[in-house]
Image: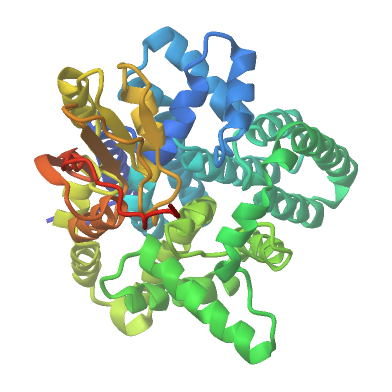
Amino acid sequence: MRHLQPSDNRRTIMAALILILAVGVCLRVGGLGERDLWTDEAWVAQAVAQEDWLAVFQQGNAEMGNHTPPLYLLTVWAVRQVGGESEAVLRLTSLMCGLGVLGLTAWLAWRLLTPGAALTASLAAALSIRLVYFSKELKPYAADAGFAVLALALTERLLGNQGRRGWLALFLAMAAGLGYSHALIFTLPVAAAVLWWRLPAARRRCLVTFAGLAVVFLGYYLMFYRSQVRPELVLYWQDYFPDLAGPGAFLQWLGLAWQRYLRYFIGDRWWWVGLGFVLLGLGSLLTGRQPRTVWYFLGPLGVSLAAACLHRYPFMAGAGGMRLMLFSAPLGYIVLGAGLAALLSFRPLARLGWLRPLAAAGLVIWLNPYNVWTENLHPQANREEIQPLVRYLEAHRRPEDLVYVYYFAIYPFRYYYQGPREPVIWGQSCQEQCLALPPRAPGSPGRLWLIFSHFETPEELEKFNRRLLGDGWHRDLHLSRPGAALFCFTRPEPETGPPETDRSPPGPS
């Protein structure tokens, strides 16, 4: 048997990379439109459901909590004008960003790492539940990751040609990116620092390029982003700003933040193994030929931590807030790949040729392939199938019926519901109780529909109904779908006893 030649090995690696990318593309495209829009997506869908593009920004700014970057909104609106209003069409912008993340992560890993480490990083990115999911959600988080990795790829391109060409491309791409991604502001200072340090002969061009981007960001901030910084958001993320009471409190807070980060992007299953790979990867990169990779990963995280200290951005937040750190995920997977490659390069292990395929198999098993595959093809996260319940309500609602819409179901309901909007009672809180209704006339049906999505558990829903309605109501109907529920209640009959006699004491004669 002849030995494998370098060209054979390269062809094998390229074939493996193509296979990995093909799987990643299939996971991102599959099931793109099979889920109904959930609460946060419906914010965006309502904003882009306008005929005039200027009205898109007015609607987007008017919706509380809809802090979507302007160019992302405009792109979704333009795609909707051409392709229609299906869920798949609305999510196409995120899909394009997600596919860009996949390809650029592989390119960047190939440039910064050894071929084996690059394959590992590409595999982790291709199968990442987080990267796949946000490629299929009508929110701009895939754009956060896409433009962050694009900024670093263009930085590497400039380093490769010693700054002779590529500055205009960097400026134009990042000027657009600042309109697609809030989080890009964390990566650009890192790119600027690397280019300034590594290309002393091109510092004037570097200064002009990034000064221009600062002016562009100022324009976005004054026109759009300043109005999106709301006090209620700062209060919502209060628990995920750094604890600056002292060094010990800060380090404890930071340790818990990193634990949340690893659990979210690598997985609850043996997350501490992922921590070991990340630390090993950082160490090997610092002592290797590409130490700037560590800066690419930790630098944007450091800038976002500084923003968190100023109460301007949550850092590694729980309660779903970790999605705001998606911009750092591609470089995290590159560091993870470097860690596994560093482990296999130890001299006692490097002599065992059979260990490399075994390690690759172990990585796949560690990634929990069955759950990854099923979740990526048919995401259960934020699956709230409210549309069939809305259609049922439209078909069976009577003119005199009242409808109560749960607080977190308001935006999906408004997007999908085509029936009369009155009388509809909009929920004021997820803790609402003692619903005040107009008096019921004797003999009237008095039906009340309650429609829900984005709730905790069915048991919590039952408690909510009891708090809202009290006793005496008769439940006529209960329909449920994943993440959504519809109830129909009949109001109690008004008391119709004999007229009361005058029991007041007799007046003076």
Q: Which quarter of the picture shows residue 450?
A: top left
> Residue at position x 43%, y 70% from top?
260
Residue 182, percent from left and from top: 63, 43
Q: Is residue 410 left or right of residue 198?
A: left
Outermost residue, left side: 476
Outermost residue, bottom side: 248
Question: Is any atom of residue 123 visible in this view?
Answer: no
> Residue at position x 72%, y 39% from top?
227
Name the residue nearer the viewer: 460 or 252. Answer: 460
Residue 387, percent from left and from top: 24, 28
Q: How many labels, in total?
A: 0
Residue 264, percent from left and from top: 38, 63
184 versus 312 height, above or below: above
Outermost residue, right side: 204
Name the residue nearer the viewer: 72 or 63. Answer: 63
Name the residue nearer the viewer: 474 or 296. Answer: 474
> Residue at position x 88%, y 38% from top?
208
Question: Is any atom of residue 35 visible in this view?
Answer: yes
**Where the N terminus falls, by quadrant?**
bottom left
Residue 147, percent from left and from top: 57, 40
Name the residue nearer the viewer: 311 or 397. Answer: 397
363 versus 383 height, above or below: below
Q: Is residue 238 left or right of residue 321?
A: right
> Residue at position x 32%, y 40% from top?
21
Q: Is residue 237 left or right of residue 94?
A: right
